[in-house]
Image: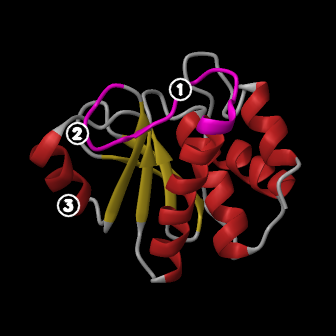
Amino acid sequence: MDEADGAVILVGRGFDASKVAPKLYVGGYPGDGLHMLQRARAAGFDRVIRVASGFPGEYKLSDSELTPSQVGIAMGAASEVAQELRAGKRVLVTCQAGINRSCFVAGLAMVMAYGCTGRQAIDRIRQCRPPRGGRTPLDNRSFANFLATYA
């Protein structure tokens, strides 16, 4: 895996993304519908994968203790992200704040696509994604513990 630069892209109000690996970005909620997709395309993203709860078309992953069904949802999303990365696509993974769910899925995808360890993925994400609202990326212990022991 090449070095990520932690670049932050700002496209309009409330749209931010941090590069955590080659062609892989995590960010907070960028908005709904066609307008959001147009903004993402204008920013150079080939694909946006949304992991949150409550919106149609998203992977419905909650920011709480992991359950077996939640692990399955996260793995499905990460598998899709990894497939896009292997195809050379530039991918943005988003959730509400860009702190836990998107970082968790991105970390799993980094292991799948780039062969790093889960611990390496955590360290890279925390290095590249600045804290938001006083929260450190992957501060959900359930997510961090699962990822740290994955691969």
- In what quadrant of the picture does the C terminus appear? bottom right
Q: Identify residue type, mark 1.
A: Ser
Instruction: Using the rendered image of the protein, determine whether residue 117 is visible from the camera's viewpoint.
Output: yes
Residue behind mark 3:
42
Badge 3 element: helix
User: How many marks do you count on the picture?
Assistant: 3
Residue behind mark 2:
12
Does residue 139 appear to the left or right of 40 in the view shown? right
Name the residue located 51 percent from the left edge and 34 percent from the top edge: 61
Of 113 and 72, which appears nearest the observer? 72
| Residue 95 found in image quarter | top left
The magenta region covers: 54-69
Secondary structure character of the magenta stretch overall: loop
Badge 1 element: loop
Q: Residue furthest left?
A: 34
Task: State yes or no: residue 85 in magenta.
Answer: no
Q: Identify residue type, mark 2.
A: Gly
**Label 3 Cα crowd, 10 Å radius (few <14 / some 14-19 / many 20+):** few
Q: Residue furthest top?
A: 134
Q: Which mark is residue 62?
A: 1
